[in-house]
Image: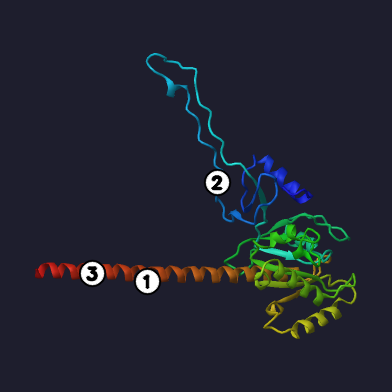
Amino acid sequence: ITNTSIYEMERRMLEKKGIRVAEDTRDADHDEGGEQASARILADLDQPGERVCVARGGPGGRGNPSFSSKADRAPKRAETGRLGDKFRIELELKVVADIGLIGFPNAGKSSLLACVSRATPKIAAYPFTTLRPYVGVVDQPPDSATTFVESFTVADIPGLIRGAHKNIGLGHVFLRHVERTKLLVLVVDAAGSEGRVPLEDLLALQEELELYLPGLSHRSRLIIANKMDLPGAEEKLEELREGLAGLDRAKHGWASAPLIPVSALSRRELPPAVEAMRSTLGQMESEKAKAAAWERKVQQQRQQKQDGGHAHAVNDWERRRVRR
């Protein structure tokens, strides 16, 4: 497995589990020399309980009972088995979460996750504090009106940089965890405390997502403007709203996503942000349930037509038989 700290942690975790293929793991084929022979995906396990056989053992040899005879009841003779499949694979683990927090380093993603859930990611005032994804569970409050989502999981994706789609700054190690999320939450520094421009950050994140995996940038999303407690944040927020309103919706459809100003440090406006996440997930689950119900209805109608056509054919055959 690739010799980085992230992969080493995953490798040690797999060893503790007896090299068992973990849930939501992709296997990439390698040749015997260790080099990646191709980008062929052997398996993509994204559902609980899924299993796959990636290598088969060789057939076993015959034991000494197979050579017993009347003359030799206990033969001291046996056959060795043949070798099975032999090659190296790469196990790639991806975080499975309902929501992924995406942003540039030091945008406040870890602080936001710690505020809305019981997760305890490392928080510090310097970039790249988070080196691996953290997942927190957000429980449903008693007064919530959302019925489709009782609780949901939020993943803090380590900070991205420009060129992440080219694997710059371990970009692929971080971006791969975004693929499984249902809802993307883009977190930006609304105050521009490190000389950043929120609108430029959003455009750069959009570009990195699309270049890494075409279509990923069109996934449902929310935009959270963090650090609203810092001076000048209100003015920057208005500039961000104007900039989003001026974007071409045909090219930047994500710009119409809800923009929610919060302050993770002072915990301002966090309940509306959490409720927006919950309601968006609830709408997605509702649409998914409706689509599944419609698909079942269509399948039932097709089955009824097939059954009706079969019965009609049987009746025609019976009538012809009576006439003969």
Amino acid marked by disc 2: Cys
Q: Earlier in the sequence, mark 1 or mark 3?
A: 1
**Of the numbered discs in the image, which one, if any, rests on residue 120?**
none
x then y, percent, for residue 233: 86, 76
Which residue shows up at 76% across the image and 64% down it?
166
Q: Could you tell whether 314 is left or right of 38 in the image?
A: left
Q: Is residue 271 shown to the viewer in this render?
A: no
**Of the numbered discs in the image, which one, if any, rests on residue 53?**
2
Which residue shows up at 59% across the image and 72% down it?
283
Count of numbered badges drawn on the protein: 3
Contact check, label 3 and label 2, Cβ < 8 Å: no
Quickly name the residue at label 1. Answer: 301
Residues packed near mark 3 inside 10 Å, few (<14), some (14 to 19) or many (20 plus) = few
Q: Secondary structure at mark 1?
A: helix
The quadrant of the rendering that contains the C terminus is bottom left
Q: Quadrant of residue 98?
A: bottom right
Q: Earlier in the sequence, mark 1 or mark 2?
A: 2
Q: Quadrant of residue 311?
A: bottom left
x then y, percent, for residue 53: 55, 46
Residues packed near mark 2 inside 10 Å, few (<14), some (14 to 19) or many (20 plus) = few
Q: Is residue 89 above or below residue 110?
A: above
Q: For the residues marked 1 and 2, what is the alpha-carbon distance in whole angstroms?
A: 37 Å
x then y, percent, for residue 138: 68, 60
Q: Secondary structure at mark 2?
A: loop
Q: Secondary structure at mark 3?
A: helix
The label nearer to you, 1 versus 3, is 3
Q: Nearer the viewer, residue 109 or 268?
A: 109
Quickly name the residue at label 3. Answer: 313
Amino acid marked by disc 3: Ala
The label nearer to you, 1 versus 2, is 2
Q: Is residue 97 shown to the viewer in this render?
A: yes
Q: For the residues marked 3 and 2, what is the alpha-carbon distance in whole angstroms?
A: 45 Å
